[in-house]
Amino acid sequence: MEKVIYDFYSDLFDSHVHLPPYHLREDGYVIPSVLPSEVRHAIKSMTNRTAPGPDRIRPEHLKSLPTAIVNTLARLFTRYL
């Protein structure tokens, strides 16, 4: 019985919960990570059929990005904060 209880609580407190990392600036201000869901929401809120910028990328192109690219963008945006 002791082993069952030990295994149960070992698994319980050893669970791996993913929390977004936080970055600490030199002045001590904590910068939260940009989440992929925030990037996806920002892209989806863009108006279609608008003129592209100097990069010639239209909102329609961004809206069809695969999840892996959105995740990469979120990591890059976090790094640039």
Image: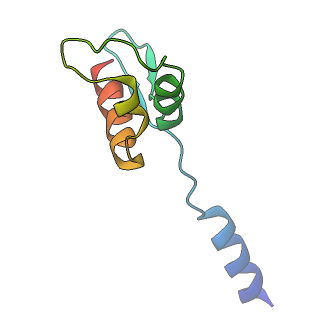
Nearer to me, 33 or 73: 73
Query: Could you say where residue 10 lies in the image, as x and y percent from the top left?
Result: 64, 72
Q: Quadrant of the C terminus?
A: top left
Q: How many marks?
A: 0
Residue at left 49%, top 33%?
40
Residue at left 33%, top 34%?
73
Query: Could you say where residue 62 lies in the image, as x and y percent from the top left?
Result: 37, 31
Query: Could you say where residue 13 lies in the image, as x and y percent from the top left?
Result: 65, 62
Q: Quadrant of residue 54?
A: top left
User: How is the protein colored in the picture?
Assistant: rainbow
Residue at left 54%, top 28%?
41
Q: Quadrant of residue 64?
A: top left
Query: Could you say where residue 42 lies in the image, as x and y percent from the top left?
Result: 49, 23
Image side of residue 16 versus residue 48, left or right = right
Nearer to me, 21 or 40: 40
In the image, residue 58 above or below residue 17: above
Nearer to me, 55 or 75: 55
Q: Quadrant of the N terminus?
A: bottom right
As drawn, the residue found furthest toward the front would be: 49
In the image, residue 2 above or below residue 65: below
Residue at left 45%, top 19%?
30
